[in-house]
Image (spheres, grey):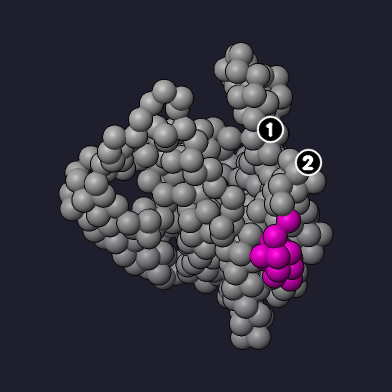
Amino acid sequence: MANSSFPFWSAAHRAEILENPLQTYLLGIIISICGNVLISISLNIQKYAHVRQSQRGSKPYYTSVMWWSGVVLMGVGELGNFAAYGFAPASLVAPLGCVSVIASAIISVVFLKETVRASDIVGGTLAITGTYILVTFAPHTTTHITAHLVQYYSISWHFLLYLFIEVILFCILLYVYKRKNVKHIVIVMLLVALLASLTVISVKAVSGMIGESIKGQLQLIYPIFYVMFVIMVASCAFQIKFLNQAMKMFDATEVVPINFVFFTASAIVAGIVFYQEFEGLALLNIFMFLFGCLLSFLGVFLIARNRPKIKQQDRNIISLDKIPGRVHAGKVQPDAKTSTYGSLAAKLMCSRAGQTDDS
């Protein structure tokens, strides 16, 4: 029965690809870029609201109208990214996330008066060049995502094999992270990336089926829609959990570029395995697409690296010989080899990471 139905699914798949116009593809790109720009604007608005509230020292940041406007803008931007998956290939929408990093760097320089560094200029140039190459050589077709097509993709042998490998790898990493207490940034980011793979698959499925329902072909009556919706919500929730843990343990200059690289790679692999987005794509296009990804990765790394940091010891430690009437009588700081060395600094860094998450 399954063998006899395969030609039908294959023919239907090709028909859906051929019917998809180039305008739909370009619309997905524009929506994704606009969504990422809105996200970068929202992050900088929230950051400015935090700075202003801390200077005034009066009310909490969540009482600020400006902060809430940033939250609303972020919601609109994420909604745009969600919609983009319904129009453009997942392997293209995910790398376009570098637009948010580029726009954020520009906004922080223009409005927040941050210093322009040579690495920002070089990184921005590389990221823009990589984005142009991505858009030019990425798959220029996408399927009409229907419930039947998602069901067909879900039981394909290559996806089931991919899912099996991903689950095994996730369990091993989670065991090392939780049981063995190995708190390495690569392990945490790999956990996020494996979850992101499921997020991309489910987001594109849900977005595509909602789009088809709006066009008049109701897809919400099929159980696969709700299965994908649950997977989308659950994977997003656990992604946020592990990302917050990473922000508490490591600096944002490490988390941002590594997360972008891992997330983009997992999204591309998910698009290739589940939605077969590279099927029929020329070898030159594949090579140039991967080259564009590499340029974007390098650009984001250069923009995010060595951002200005607040040195906690400079702000929180007061030398005794600077206090009138006090005599310096010995070492104030504990020895670096003692078990208590740096414990206060660690707590301060956690607190700063939590504030960074909010902003």
**Residue 118: which quarter of the image?**
bottom right
Q: Is residue 345 magenta?
A: no
1 and 2 marks in contact (CB < 8 Å): yes
SS for callout 1? helix
Q: Position of residue 273 (x, y in %)?
A: 48, 67
Q: Position of residue 177 (x, y in %)?
A: 26, 52
Q: Residues within 10 Å of mark 1 (few under 14, many from 20)?
A: some
Kind of residue indicated by mark 1: Tyr
Can residue 304 be seen here? The reply is yes
Residue at image x 25%, y 54%? Answer: 182
Foreground residue among 264 and 82: 264
Q: CA distance from mark 1 to mark 2?
A: 9 Å
Q: Earlier in the sequence, mark 1 or mark 2?
A: 1
Q: Position of residue 109 (x, y in %)?
A: 75, 48
Q: Is residue 127 magenta?
A: yes
Residue at image x 80%, y 46%? Answer: 110
Which region of the structure is painted magenta?
116-129
Residue at image x 65%, y 86%? Answer: 284
SS for callout 2? loop
Check disc 1 and report the residue beneath it. 48
Dominant SS of magenta comes to helix
Foreground residue among 57 and 329: 329
Kind of residue indicated by mark 2: Phe
Check disc 2 and report the residue beneath it. 111
The N terminus sits in image quarter: bottom left
Can residue 353 be seen here? The reply is no
